[in-house]
Image (cartoon, rainbow, N blue to C red):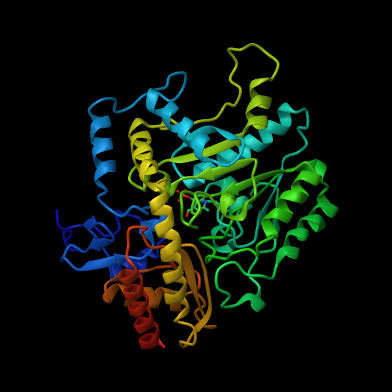
Amino acid sequence: MTFHPNRHSMSSHWLAFTSNRRFHQQPRLVDRAEGIFYYTPQGQPLYDSLSGLWCTPLGHGNQAITEAISRQLGYLDYAPAFNVSHPLAFELADKLAELAPGDLNHTLFCNSGSEAADTALKLARAYWRAKGRAEKTKFIGRSKGYHGVNFGGISVGGIVGNRKLYGQTLDTYHLPHTWLAQNRFAKGVPTEGDYLADSLLSILEVQDASNIAAVIVEPMAGSGGVIVPSAGYLKRLRELCDQHDILLIFDEVITGFGRLGSLFGADFFDVQPDILTCAKALTNGVVPMGAVISNDDIYATLMDQPGDDYLIEFPHGYTYSAHPLACASALASLAQLTKPALMSKVRELSGVFEQAIHQLKGLPLVEDIRNIGLAGAIQIEADPAHPLKRASDISALCWDKGVYVRFGGNNLSFAPPFICTAEDIQHIFARVAEAIQEYA
Ligand code: PLP
């Protein structure tokens, strides 16, 4: 059905993470998608420059996923998630154990990146309690980090706009972000910044490691504006967590499943976390699903707790954990995302992407450009009177030019589908350059 602003009440749908008042003046709708394009109800094609919300690397309308879900729908549409399961859930968990690095072998399923973050935090606390160290409850996140919108996630998250309205959070501390002025316009992984990991020591000096359950970071801060850490930063963080008996959680909701040209950010940076969270590309965004993959030690610790075996080891889960349709979608997505030829293509396109995005250096208002793999951001100089307005206005101009561009804070973010071509990438940045020039 076609959307008519005069037939639909604009206020009945309260849009997520959106300035609803602005949307009402300028509704932006898509009603169809295919490959790397969205289409407006009027039929205008729009390049999907962020793979939806970082979640559709295989593009839209992927036939194998569509068929897998349709088949599953006719077979088993829902199975209770508690005390009962179904074969696809085990198949998918086995697959994730095979794909995830090192001894990350045990998956708890959920339905989103936010749920995955909160699940991981609860798991960390439960682990320490089972180890007899119940005082280890505090968490350390990072400034500009994003771990979704639930209370755990906003507590460890470091984007002030997502926290300031909501009062008391969990007991958390934050590492400084890894954006450094001297790395501006660095291509790929910057050289400066390993020392930023040592800020963990300053937090421990005051809080003491005996009270800290876990450090949680994204391998690269995606929603914060594709802020890439220096090559040795995560290794140093791992080292410090080991020295101080603190779990390390990687939130790979964006970096998971190929975005950096490696299957996981952990592989790209060659650092092993204790818990890894993922979502988004896991199902190619077609059915909501999140996953929390924990290492052997955490699993064994919770399974080996004393007490009767009818007791629940980890009282946590969702009605839709390991939903059959999500499992079908994930298995079909992973069968494609793990093909070596696709990863090679992502790495090849990453070079084209890097060149294309950095060509915008020197345009008015562009104060930084960052990239890693097939992800990048253009940081727009803030207007002191209206600090968050420019990126939003430029994104609106891009839409009129046939490119859907995500903005967040002062950043325009890009993460094109893996199925795009070099020409698509060049076309996208040519339109974005025009929009910035026209706006300035
Ligand atoms: N963690 C990271 C790193 C994310 O980028 C996101 C979403 O962008 C989330 C968590 C939250 O995921 P969701 O929106 O599926 O709850």
Q: Quadrant of residue 135?
A: top right
**Residue 382 at least partly seen:** no
Q: Quadrant of the C terminus?
A: bottom left
Q: Is residue 197 left or right of residue 74?
A: right
**Residue 139 at least partly seen:** yes
Q: Is residue 325 left or right of residue 214?
A: left
Where residue 178 appears, as percent x and y from the top left, is 65, 66
Q: Is residue 399 above or below residue 332?
A: below
Q: Is residue 369 left or right of residue 123?
A: left
Q: Is residue 103 above or below residue 283?
A: above
Q: Nearer the viewer, residue 267 or 180?
A: 267
**Which residue is situated farthest in the right direction here?**
205
Q: Quadrant of residue 214?
A: top right
Q: Residue at x 65, y 25 (%)?
A: 300
Q: Nearer the viewer, residue 45 or 392?
A: 45
Q: Residue at x 72, y 30 (%)?
A: 129
Q: Nearer the viewer, residue 212 or 282?
A: 282
Where residue 157 appears, as percent x and y from the top left, is 60, 55
Where residue 320 appears, as percent x and y from the top left, is 41, 32
**Number of callouts:** 0
Q: Is residue 306 left or right of residue 292?
A: right
Q: Nearer the viewer, residue 44 or 102?
A: 102
Q: Residue at x 61, y 55 (%)?
A: 269
Q: Is residue 80 above or below residue 248?
A: above
Q: Residue at x 17, y 62 (%)?
A: 41
Where residue 242 appears, as percent x and y from the top left, is 76, 44
Q: Is residue 350 above or below residue 56?
A: below
